[in-house]
Amino acid sequence: MIILAIETSCDETSVAIIKDGNVLSNIISSQYIHNKFGGVVPEIASRSHLKSISFVMSEALSKAEVNIFDIDAIAVTTEPGLIGSLVVGSNFAKGLSLKFNKPVIPINHIEGHLFSGFINNPELKFPFLALVVSGGHTILFEVINYNSYEIIGQTLDDAAGEAFDKTAKLIGLTYPGGPLIDKYARMGNPEKYNFPRPLINSGDFNFSFSGLKTSVRYFIAKNFPDGVEEQDYPDLCASVQEAIVDVLVSKSLLAAKHRGINQLVVAGGVSANSRLRERLNKSSEENSLKIFIPEFQYCMDNAAMIGFIASKKIEEKGLSFYYNLTFTASPNVFRRKAKK
Ligand code: KG4
Ligand code: ZN
């Protein structure tokens, strides 16, 4: 079974080829054009997807040494994300389907992240907890199997990646700020400044990051009225990062304890954060919790994770179920409520 998977929900154009659940290629083209605007500009994102999608697909096919006539199905992210970006991928998939007479499996992007822990991790078994942390989402799931999972907590306002990006902008760093905060923080003291850890003691599994951003704004206005200089980046970045990581780690451990589950998958762009990885690995030893963090290329937005979950859907429903092209792109997180 060969699947050509497409992901264009935000600012990465990605196409992957998956054969029998194994990744043969996973090409990701990131749109650096947004850096100078300090965030993703939706109209530019969809135009950039349009420009690069054919080329990215050719690269994916050629790296996998697969001819497009040999694929069995197409998988595409249809929700959630930027609507203009999703429409590019969805319509490209429909066009391929009509031209080559292949079925299309519409995929929810969050489901892609949710099950990305299985790629290259044969030891991962159901049930597990999954923390999906990206620029758009911070959600904790309890996952029973491919068809059954429950949102047990989520952010009430900003996502963790958004907190990284917005505080980075206040400090004077370019977009996306997460990797830069991570880089400077490695040289800084995380205890130098004390930023709030919102909802850390709330007892539930929800998150809130917008207060942190406001607190960093006031802190900078008071202590660095002329702007933050590069020599001050390390301590400031380390302290902000520690506040975000503290909350993510503490809520994940609490969820594992309450639900009696000893496996945690961490996925989405923020799972690339080195301090988050370090802290989780440390607590895994202390709490006998097994941590699964996908390889970097499967943490960020990528088509391999879309193809992987599509292969499971095909196993369940069969290819013939997916010849009907009535699906539409949607910006919403879960049109179908996550089920248990
Ligand atoms: O999953 P992703 O590629 O796209 C979305 O679906 O949002 O995640 C992108 C987010 C951005 O907010 C970016 O700043 C953050 O992930 N990010 C990081 C790191 N690498 C990427 N945040 C903290 N530390 C990192 N090393
Ligand atoms: Zn994502």
Image: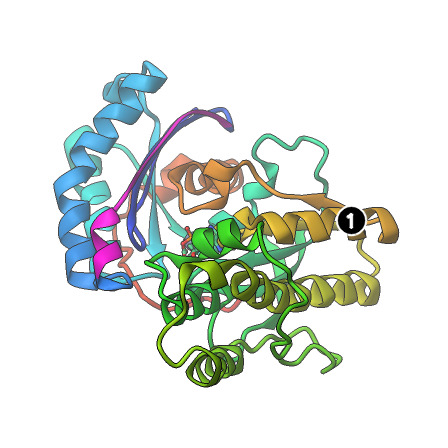
**Does the magenta-highlighted stretch encompass residue 25?**
yes
Residue occupying image coordinates x 50% and y 44%: 299
Say what secondary structure mark 1 lies in. helix
Residue 275, above or below 256: above
Residue occupying image coordinates x 46% and y 37%: 297
Q: Position of residue 51 (x, y in %)?
A: 12, 42
Q: Position of residue 321 (x, y in %)?
A: 39, 43
Residue 14, above or below 182: above
* Magenta segment: 22-36
Question: Circle 1 sits on which residue?
Answer: 282
Q: Amino acid at mark 1?
A: Lys
Residue 15, above or below 255: above
167 or 68, which lies in front? 167
**Does the magenta-highlighted stretch encompass residue 141?**
no
Q: Quadrant of the C terminus?
A: bottom right
127 or 33, which lies in front? 33
Kindly tell me whether residue 209 is visible in this rendering: yes
Query: Is 336 left, or right, of 131 in this rendering?
Result: left
Q: Position of residue 4 (x, y in %)?
A: 33, 31
Kindly tell me whether residue 339 is visible in this rendering: no
Ligand 1's quadrant: bottom left
Query: Is 275 left, or right, of 11 in this rendering?
Result: right
Q: Position of residue 115 (x, y in %)?
A: 56, 46
Residue occupying image coordinates x 43% and y 61%: 135
Q: Is disc 1 surrounded by few (<14), some (14 to 19) or many (20+) residues within 10 Å?
A: few
Describe the colour scheme in one phrase: rainbow
